[in-house]
Image (tube, helix red, strand yellow):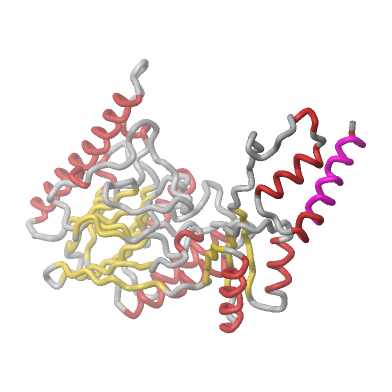
Amino acid sequence: MKILHTSDWHLGRSLYSKSNRNAEHHSFLEWLLMIVKNNAIDVLLVSGDIFDTATPSSNSQTMYFDFLIQAKQDGCKNIVIVGGNHDAPSFLNATKKMLTSLNIYVIGCACENIEDEIIIIKDSLHVPKLIVCAVPFLRERDISKYVDGENDTDRSQRVNNAIKKHYDDIAKLAELKRNSLGVNIPIIATGHLSVVGGIRNDDDGVRETYIGNIEAVSSNIFPQVFDYVALGHFHVPSVIKNHIRYCGSPISMGFGEAKQNKCIYILNYNPEQCIETIDIPQFQKLESIAGDKTFIAARLQELKQFNNSVWVEIIYKGTELFPDLSYWVQEYIKDTNIEVIKIQSRQNIQEVLTKQDVCESLEELNPSDVFKLLMLKKNITTEMQADLLELYNQVILSLHVEN
């Protein structure tokens, strides 16, 4: 059996002014279909967060269903999809019965009967080859009852215990099913949650999944009967243990992931487990440029030479005041394939006057005098002082007019 592990597609994802990233997702899904076909994948596992929102757009829905149909036509015999915390269980489950007839198994949320989360994969001769414990994102309300008056620590422990119990229970049932089948076939589990050892970025859009003190659960919650645990939720590929892995998101969720390699995993049981990592191409180049004016100009000049489409984040960290930063950047990249979609200045421009800076009392100074002293303290050039003072006086004048 060949099993492909992917997750966190986030169809419909936006990035600041880029509200439409359909081209990236379309390119990824086309690439994934090629991998499925060329590697003769028997089972495709998608470990949650297929969509970025609970109400996916018509374009996102079309990409999803078109992919499923094409994957089946390209020879993928079985597809297992579990819901993530971004997905709406009702939406995923709406087509569950219809897709099951095509050997596409969808588990949008925890099932009332946990046995319904166990899927037995058979070959073309109906011989059992694999058991999948298709565990979706476990919402607190689905696995545990709220207790009045409990504090955050108690609540966290209750939820943690409920998650562990869910995996313990489904592992026991899966093992019983394997024993009843009389064949020693692999048992694989999915999960969409935060596990200790997973890597996340500050700007990757990963939502906290549980209220309280649960930041991440231990990998020890997964019983040893699982031959592999296909995780989703964190967007950075990471190996918790050799058989417990996050494959990450296929495209960069934010500029913090711009330099990260994206990947999928292919498991090959022939007869022992072999895990192959396949890198995903970058379908849209992202670049974060942080520095002073000279550094930013130099890096933009380098990007111009490649003449490729690049989405850029500019973080200005210079000491010189740069009030026309946005205008300067746009002029610098005019007539290029560079598109700056985020500009941020991280100057520490907050300043106060102390007794060492001025002899007079504050009451003896007018606003312009205070502003001039502050510019001197910040070592603003004489040329820029004149420009800033003119702008400052316009602000003061507008305040008087409004009053």
Depth check, front residue: 112 or 338: 338
Residue 237 occupies which quadrant of the picture? bottom left
Instruction: Give me the residue at 76% from left, 58% from top.
Output: 382
Q: Residue furthest front?
A: 359
Left or right, 110 with reference to 88:
left
**Extent of the magenta region:** 387-401
Whether residue 340 can be seen here: yes
Instruction: Give me the residue at 45% from left, 52% from top.
Output: 95
Quarter of the image with the N terminus is bottom left
Percent x, y of residue 184:
9, 60
Q: Is residue 330 above or below residue 149?
A: below
Classified by dominant secondary structure, the portion drawn in magenta counts as helix
Instruction: Give me the residue at 79% from left, 41% from top.
Output: 369
Q: Is residue 396 magenta?
A: yes
Percent x, y of residue 78:
31, 64
Q: Residue furthest top?
A: 149
Left or right, 69 with reference to 270:
right
Whether residue 131 can be seen here: no
Percent x, y of residue 196:
27, 47
Depth check, front residue: 262 or 110: 262
Instruction: Give me the residue at 22% from left, 42% from top.
Output: 167
Left or right, 389 with reference to 48:
right
